[in-house]
Amino acid sequence: MQSISCALDPARPLLFMTTVITSYEEVDEIAFKNLNEEIIQKLIKKTGPQIKFLTRWKREFGVVVENVDRRQSTSEVDIANFDLTVDDDSSFPLSLEIEKSFAIESQNFDFSKIDNADLSVDLRNPITDLVSVLRTSATGLSILSHYKSHRNLPEDFRNDLVDFIISIEICTSPELVISPARFVELSQLIVDLFPTEVKETYYIPYSYDKATKSKILPKGKFHSKYNNGYRANLLASGAIVKKTATKRKRNEISGSVHLGFTSDLKSELTDEEYAEKVKWLKENIDSWAEVKKLWADTSKKRISHLLADTSMNHYIESFTVLKHVTNGPQLIDIDFLTIHPKKTLNLSLNFDLFAKQLVSYSSNKKRKSEVIQLLLKKISSLSQSEDLNSTELKKVSILKLLPLLLPAPGPFQSITGTLSPWRPSKDEVQKGFILHVKDELDLRAELKNRRDNLKNYGLTEQPIVSVVGMSKIESYNVHVNNITYQLASVLEAVDIAFKSFYAFQLSYPKESEYSWMVLQQKIYGIKGEKDGPVLPCIRTFITDLNNCKV
């Protein structure tokens, strides 16, 4: 500890005083010079900053501080003779606001180097040999070494690769611009070097779909990093100036899922035969064997009519047999079997491998959400038991992983325009795929909340799977148009829900459509007549699953 004494630099007291006056309103020069401890306590509430402020104040005005018992009041002791001892290291801030300002203003910074610097970019050559370029950095070597050993690129390495490439390519243009055509070329360079990668993961250029008369905006990792990272930072810093352009409206057109190709729906029934069989189906529900036979006979023609112009509500009301909660799923299965006879058992045949890949993929993620970690822990715990309930709970938990591993769709605009755009949360995405609740009361509440929310955004209620019972499963359900079908297992429920999209010609639920797309491509292997290209995020995810070691 030491007593403080310092020679007065004529400029420093004025600078210190000006700094404090800036921080504390209405403290002018005269008031500042006549401060006392009582006033300082009002200006600076905490004891530590009070002491440091007073020490600096005395130091800057060149007063020697003598030893005095600090417990005495300022009315008994002249502040000019007040002794204040501090640690040798007196660099600790007076207070956050004062010290920041004082530190900047009290030093004579030399900005001439940055002011006189040439800020035009040092141009680089475009990448032609990706291997050679990657070998010039530690990041690049890590990417190459990992791929050589594992034959795949984890998501972190993909992002690092994109970041590295853009950092070079953006400096090949004086305007710091990378063209869409160049992004296509760079994506091809990546796939040429890393053949298990998907080109569309990195870039999909703008296009126009004549079939749907819709614009397909650019997508991919290059597009996102370039625009939201590099270009955004350059614009914010003033390094480049944004060029004005006509604002484009967001494309929100979403095509429906189709059961198959229309050529598959040609029926050998005459119109008279069809009308007679349909009339019987609409009027009878008792003879279930006859119902199933006539349902299969009329399947192609019914689906053709539904595909043409029949509404879902009218269709279900016309065929009362569809409302049977336990037999109705059999009719859905019959219609799916009519068009895809070789696909109907795909989920049960492929699920074991799919489940192992999902768990492996989730376990190997470097950054796992708390929900994913809890699900993995639960799956591991349930694997120790072989009873039916534990086996089913394990399958439910594995399926609940799927939507958490995919991007969230959206945002969706409200129909009134008064609500903020809705981008479903991970919880909403998961519930839109498999709604797992504790009891029937909870189920009704969740379904109502979902219905109300979808209505606000002009979205319809599409089929959804629900599982009732958190520790002991009580029921498996598929909800379609106010009908609750009851199934015997979670795989049966997911299977019937998937088939219902095709049997009823419905689009996937918006909040969980990516999960159903994965099942369509990976499990069922179905390509519809009007299905567009597989989304790059889906292709990439499926590729990553296939590369998982199980």
Image (cartoon, rainbow, N blue to C red):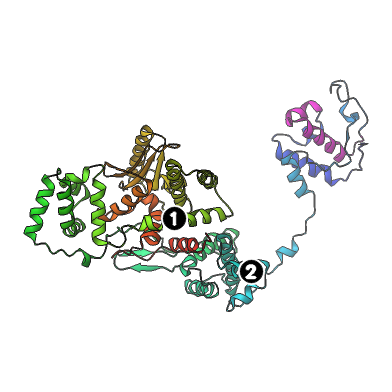
In screen coordinates, is 277 left or right of 159?
A: left
On-image quarter of the N terminus:
top right
The residue at the far left in this view is: 272
Q: Main secondary structure of the magenta part?
A: helix
What amino acid type should be assigned to the residue bearing mark 2? Ser
Q: Is label 2 in a helix, a strand or a loop?
A: helix
Q: Position of residue 456 (x, y in %)?
A: 34, 43
Q: Which residues are magenta?
A: 37-64
Q: Position of residue 469 (x, y in %)?
A: 41, 37
Asked if residue 61 lies in the magenta stretch, the reply is yes
The residue to which callout 2 is attached is 145
The residue to which callout 1 is attached is 352
What is the spatial separation of the Cα atoms under label 2 and label 1, in whole angstroms? 31 Å
Identify which residue, 85 or 126, lies in the foreground.
126
In screen coordinates, is 458 left or right of 133?
A: left
In screen coordinates, is 81 left or right of 32?
A: right
Identify which residue, 323 or 291, lies in the foreground.
291
What amino acid type should be assigned to the residue bearing mark 1? Asp
User: Does residue 457 appear in this view?
Assistant: no
Return the mark for residue 28: none
Asked if residue 236 lies in the magenta stretch, the reply is no
